[in-house]
Amino acid sequence: MNKSYVSLILILSITFLSSFVAGLVTQLNIDPWYQSLNKLSFSPPNWIFGPVWTVLYAFMSIAIWIVYEKSKKSDLIFSKKILRYYFFHLGVSLSWSFIFFYFHLIFLAFINILVLIIAIIFLMNLYFPRSKLSFTLMVPYIIWVIFAAVLNFGLYLVN
């Protein structure tokens, strides 16, 4: 197997492990607390989140993999740094599920999501000069997370 595909499999595995943990925390803590919250009129149905996040996690994994593979050939220090930034961002993303669903701290979860938006923008800025495709793969993600921030803040306001 080509070595670059090993790095893709590792990145996908770590990313989807994070997704699995976030989903588990969400599923174990969604009832009855979340169900009892006042929802916004434009809140999507719960079933939409799984498929959307699955696609977004795949896109973000491919995006980092492309940049990592391109940069490790020319700038090994940057390639290691970009992976650290990516996994930091993944940790911020994962922590939202704990803050929101486990601890029920809606406003703190909103602050967390603002940090996540900054981390995504930071990554996108690093991706852009190295891979327009990686940058483009992150666009649906940043849009969805901004929408999630609006939902999060809205839930804070109405509850």
Image: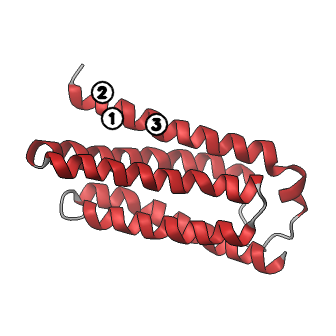
Mark 3 / mark 1, whichever is N-terminal: 1
Q: Amino acid at mark 2?
A: Val
Image coordinates of residue 125 in percent, x first then y, are 29, 68
Q: Do tag 2 and tag 3 residues touch (Cβ < 8 Å)?
A: no
- Give left or right: position of 51 versus 129: right
Q: Which residue is mark 3?
A: 14
Q: Which residue is mark 1?
A: 8
Image quarter of the N terminus = top left
* Camera-nearest residue between 141 and 112: 112
Q: Do tag 1 and tag 2 residues touch (Cβ < 8 Å)?
A: yes
Determine whether 151 is above or below 65 in the image.
below
Image coordinates of residue 154 in percent, x first then y, are 73, 77
- Give left or right: position of 40 versus 92: right
Give the residue at the far left of this rendering: 74
Is residue 143 visible in the rendered image? The answer is: no
- Which residue lies at the image location 18% right of the left edge and 64% below the top edge? 129
Determine whether 38 is above or below 79 in the image.
below
Disc sitting over residue 6 in the figure: 2
Determine whether the residue tagged by mark 2 lies in a helix, strand or loop: helix
Image quarter of the C terminus = bottom right
Determine whether the residue tagged by mark 1 lies in a helix, strand or loop: helix
